[in-house]
Amino acid sequence: MPENSTISTQNASQGTIVLGSQAPGTQTTYLSNLFNPDSSLASFFSTLFYAAIAVGAILAVLRLGYAGFLYMTSDVWSTKQHATGIIQETVLGLLLLLAVWLILNQINPDILNLDILRNIGGSK
Protein backbone atom coordinates (compact mmCIF):
# COMPACT_ATOMS: atom_id res chain seq x y z
CA MET A 1 0.00 0.00 0.00
CA PRO A 2 1.52 3.39 -0.95
CA GLU A 3 2.40 5.84 1.82
CA ASN A 4 0.11 8.65 0.64
CA SER A 5 -3.00 6.53 0.11
CA THR A 6 -6.05 6.85 2.33
CA ILE A 7 -8.80 4.41 3.13
CA SER A 8 -12.24 5.78 2.40
CA THR A 9 -15.81 4.57 2.50
CA GLN A 10 -18.65 5.79 0.35
CA ASN A 11 -21.69 7.39 1.94
CA ALA A 12 -24.54 7.97 -0.51
CA SER A 13 -25.95 11.11 1.11
CA GLN A 14 -22.73 12.74 2.38
CA GLY A 15 -20.08 11.90 -0.20
CA THR A 16 -16.75 10.35 0.73
CA ILE A 17 -15.67 9.86 4.33
CA VAL A 18 -11.93 9.48 4.85
CA LEU A 19 -11.13 7.29 7.83
CA GLY A 20 -8.40 8.53 10.13
CA SER A 21 -8.82 12.20 9.23
CA GLN A 22 -10.08 15.12 11.31
CA ALA A 23 -13.49 16.63 10.94
CA PRO A 24 -13.51 19.97 9.11
CA GLY A 25 -13.02 22.89 11.46
CA THR A 26 -11.57 20.83 14.32
CA GLN A 27 -8.05 20.90 15.64
CA THR A 28 -6.60 18.35 18.06
CA THR A 29 -3.23 19.08 19.64
CA TYR A 30 -3.25 16.82 22.69
CA LEU A 31 -0.37 14.53 21.73
CA SER A 32 1.31 16.67 19.09
CA ASN A 33 2.97 18.89 21.74
CA LEU A 34 4.28 16.04 23.90
CA PHE A 35 7.65 15.65 22.17
CA ASN A 36 7.80 18.97 20.33
CA PRO A 37 11.15 20.67 21.15
CA ASP A 38 9.59 24.12 20.66
CA SER A 39 6.83 23.60 23.24
CA SER A 40 7.02 24.84 26.81
CA LEU A 41 7.12 22.83 30.01
CA ALA A 42 3.54 23.87 30.74
CA SER A 43 2.23 22.44 27.48
CA PHE A 44 4.24 19.26 28.12
CA PHE A 45 2.56 18.73 31.50
CA SER A 46 -0.87 19.56 30.12
CA THR A 47 -0.43 17.09 27.27
CA LEU A 48 0.97 14.48 29.63
CA PHE A 49 -2.08 14.89 31.90
CA TYR A 50 -4.54 14.32 29.06
CA ALA A 51 -2.50 11.39 27.76
CA ALA A 52 -2.44 9.80 31.24
CA ILE A 53 -6.22 10.10 31.54
CA ALA A 54 -6.68 8.54 28.09
CA VAL A 55 -4.29 5.67 28.86
CA GLY A 56 -6.01 5.09 32.22
CA ALA A 57 -9.42 4.91 30.56
CA ILE A 58 -8.17 2.50 27.89
CA LEU A 59 -6.55 0.25 30.49
CA ALA A 60 -9.75 0.30 32.56
CA VAL A 61 -11.80 -0.85 29.57
CA LEU A 62 -9.32 -3.66 28.90
CA ARG A 63 -9.44 -4.69 32.57
CA LEU A 64 -13.24 -4.71 32.47
CA GLY A 65 -13.10 -7.00 29.45
CA TYR A 66 -10.68 -9.33 31.25
CA ALA A 67 -12.89 -9.44 34.36
CA GLY A 68 -15.95 -10.12 32.23
CA PHE A 69 -14.11 -12.96 30.51
CA LEU A 70 -13.16 -14.43 33.89
CA TYR A 71 -16.71 -14.13 35.15
CA MET A 72 -18.30 -15.72 32.08
CA THR A 73 -15.87 -18.62 31.64
CA SER A 74 -15.65 -19.84 35.22
CA ASP A 75 -17.96 -22.09 37.19
CA VAL A 76 -15.99 -21.74 40.41
CA TRP A 77 -17.60 -19.33 42.85
CA SER A 78 -14.27 -17.94 44.13
CA THR A 79 -13.22 -16.98 40.59
CA LYS A 80 -16.54 -15.24 40.04
CA GLN A 81 -16.02 -13.30 43.27
CA HIS A 82 -12.51 -12.36 42.14
CA ALA A 83 -13.89 -11.15 38.78
CA THR A 84 -16.60 -9.15 40.57
CA GLY A 85 -13.91 -7.54 42.73
CA ILE A 86 -11.91 -6.60 39.63
CA ILE A 87 -15.02 -5.03 38.07
CA GLN A 88 -15.75 -3.02 41.23
CA GLU A 89 -12.15 -1.79 41.49
CA THR A 90 -12.10 -0.82 37.83
CA VAL A 91 -15.34 1.13 38.06
CA LEU A 92 -13.94 2.91 41.13
CA GLY A 93 -10.79 3.75 39.17
CA LEU A 94 -12.84 5.14 36.28
CA LEU A 95 -14.85 7.25 38.72
CA LEU A 96 -11.60 8.58 40.22
CA LEU A 97 -10.31 9.50 36.75
CA LEU A 98 -13.56 11.32 36.04
CA ALA A 99 -13.45 13.05 39.43
CA VAL A 100 -9.89 14.30 38.89
CA TRP A 101 -10.81 15.73 35.50
CA LEU A 102 -14.07 17.29 36.78
CA ILE A 103 -12.45 18.85 39.85
CA LEU A 104 -9.59 20.38 37.86
CA ASN A 105 -11.97 21.76 35.25
CA GLN A 106 -14.39 23.15 37.84
CA ILE A 107 -11.67 24.90 39.84
CA ASN A 108 -10.02 26.48 36.82
CA PRO A 109 -9.85 25.07 33.27
CA ASP A 110 -6.41 26.71 32.83
CA ILE A 111 -4.97 25.13 35.98
CA LEU A 112 -2.59 22.94 33.99
CA ASN A 113 -1.11 25.80 31.95
CA LEU A 114 1.47 26.55 34.66
CA ASP A 115 2.23 30.05 33.43
CA ILE A 116 3.52 31.19 36.81
CA LEU A 117 6.01 33.72 35.45
CA ARG A 118 3.36 35.42 33.34
CA ASN A 119 1.04 35.74 36.35
CA ILE A 120 3.79 37.04 38.65
CA GLY A 121 5.02 39.63 36.15
CA GLY A 122 1.53 41.02 35.54
CA SER A 123 0.56 41.59 39.20
CA LYS A 124 2.33 44.83 40.20
Image: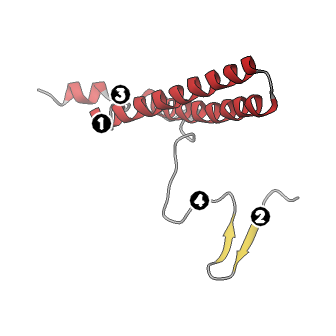
Per the model, the C-alpha gap separating discs 3 and 2 is: 40 Å
Q: Are marks 3 and 2 in contact (CB under 8 Å)?
A: no
From where the camera sits, is residue 108 visible? Answer: no
For marks 4 and 3, the one nearer the N-term is 4
Three-letter amino acid code at the position of disc 1: Gln
Q: Is residue 50 above or below residue 19?
A: above
What number is the disc on residue 114? 3
Task: State the SS at label 2.
Answer: loop
Q: Amino acid at mark 2?
A: Ile
Disc 3 residue type (three-letter):
Leu
Residue 106 disc label: 1
Q: Given this view, does label 4 or label 3 mark the residue nearer the observer?
A: 4
Badge 1 local density, few (<14 within 10 Å), some, or many (20+)? few
Query: Of label 3 and label 2, which has the lower sequence position?
Result: 2
Residue at horizontal 74 percent and vertical 68 percent from the top: 8
Q: Which residue is mark 2?
A: 7
Horizontally, is 104 left or right of 3 in the view? Answer: left
Q: Are marks 2 and 1 in contact (CB under 8 Å)?
A: no
- What amino acid is found at the position of numbered circle 4 in the picture? Gln
| Residue 16 place in picture, x, y as percent | 68, 75
Instruction: Find numbered disc 3 in the image and state the secondary structure of the residue it sits on.
Output: loop
